[in-house]
Image: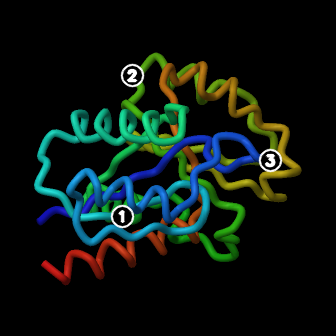
């Protein structure tokens, strides 16, 4: 049974769009998803599902959240195989000294086109390093994300699609959970 990583955008930030992870887990179990596990409070849930149509599954999850808690977050889904490829394509993998807490992967709702990528890469990034590979944006914040002048809203407008970011530590921990769930069969 395929394992899917589900990431909610903009939940549990600054007291807005609150959803408890126990609530999210129960909601997923109610949708007949299997082996449901949540990871930290930022809206990550990993599960097994027979559903092949990820767009349909995404909408089902959004509908259920909206019905349960009254807001509709963006939901980004990746299969375990897709997340594994993201990790394999890490553009900073061979560089020493990368602080994983300053390294963000933004998972996009859709792959940007060539023109959108060119617009995005033209945005001044300061000391930050930004790479776009498929449906992911990899950003290394040299001095930390909180000190950066890089405007995500400008990046998102240029890309023409929304996304949700996770630091590298979270990405690798979610992959470890997905690997464990895959081993369950």
- N-terminal of the pair, mark 2 or mark 3, is 2
Q: Position of residue 92 (x, y in %)?
A: 55, 62
Q: Position of residue 67 (x, y in %)?
A: 43, 35
> Splitting the image into 4 quarters, where does residue 150 fall?
top right
Neighbor class of circle 1 (other Cα within 10 Å; few <14, some 14-19, many 20+) is: many
Of residues 125 and 19, which is closer to you in this image? 19
N-terminal-most mark, 3 or 1: 1
Q: Earlier in the sequence, mark 1 or mark 2?
A: 1
Q: Taking 183 as reference, is 15 above or below it?
A: above
Q: Is residue 120 left or right of residue 124?
A: left
Numbered marks: total: 3
Q: Which residue is mark 3?
A: 127
Question: Which residue does the image show at 41% across and 62% down from the upper left?
Answer: 25
Q: Secondary structure at mark 3?
A: loop
Q: Which residue position is annotated with label 1?
A: 46
Q: Give the SS element for disc 2.
A: loop
Circle 2 packing at 10 Å, graded few (<14), some (14-19), many (20+), is few
Mark 3, Cα crowd under 10 Å, few <14 / some 14-19 / many 20+, is few
The residue that disc 2 covers is: 113
How far separated are the C-alphas under marks 2 and 3? 25 Å
Q: Nearer the viewer, mark 1 or mark 2?
A: 1
Q: Position of residue 158 (x, y in %)?
A: 58, 20
Give the position of the N terminus as an image quadrant: bottom left
């Amino acid at each position: 049974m395929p394992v899917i990583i589900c990431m909610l955008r903009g939940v549990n930030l600054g007291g807005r769009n609150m959803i408890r992870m126990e609530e999210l887990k129960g909601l997923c179990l109610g949708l007949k998803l299997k082996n449901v596990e949540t990871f930290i409070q930022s809206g990550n849930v990993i599960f097994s599902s027979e559903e092949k149509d990820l767009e349909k599954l995404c909408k089902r999850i959004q509908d259920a959240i909206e019905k349960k808690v009254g807001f509709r977050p963006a939901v980004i889904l990746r299969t375990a195989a897709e997340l594994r490829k993201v990790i394999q394509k890490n553009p900073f993998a061979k560089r020493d000294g990368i602080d994983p807490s300053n390294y963000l992967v933004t998972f996009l709702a859709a792959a940007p086109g060539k023109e959108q990528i060119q617009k995005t890469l033209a945005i001044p990034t300061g000391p930050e390093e930004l790479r776009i590979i498929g449906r992911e944006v990899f950003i290394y914040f040299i001095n930390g994300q909180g000190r950066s002048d890089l405007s995500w809203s400008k990046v998102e407008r240029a890309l023409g699609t929304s996304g949700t970011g996770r630091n590298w530590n979270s990405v690798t921990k979610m992959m470890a959970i997905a690997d464990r769930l895959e081993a369950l069969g």
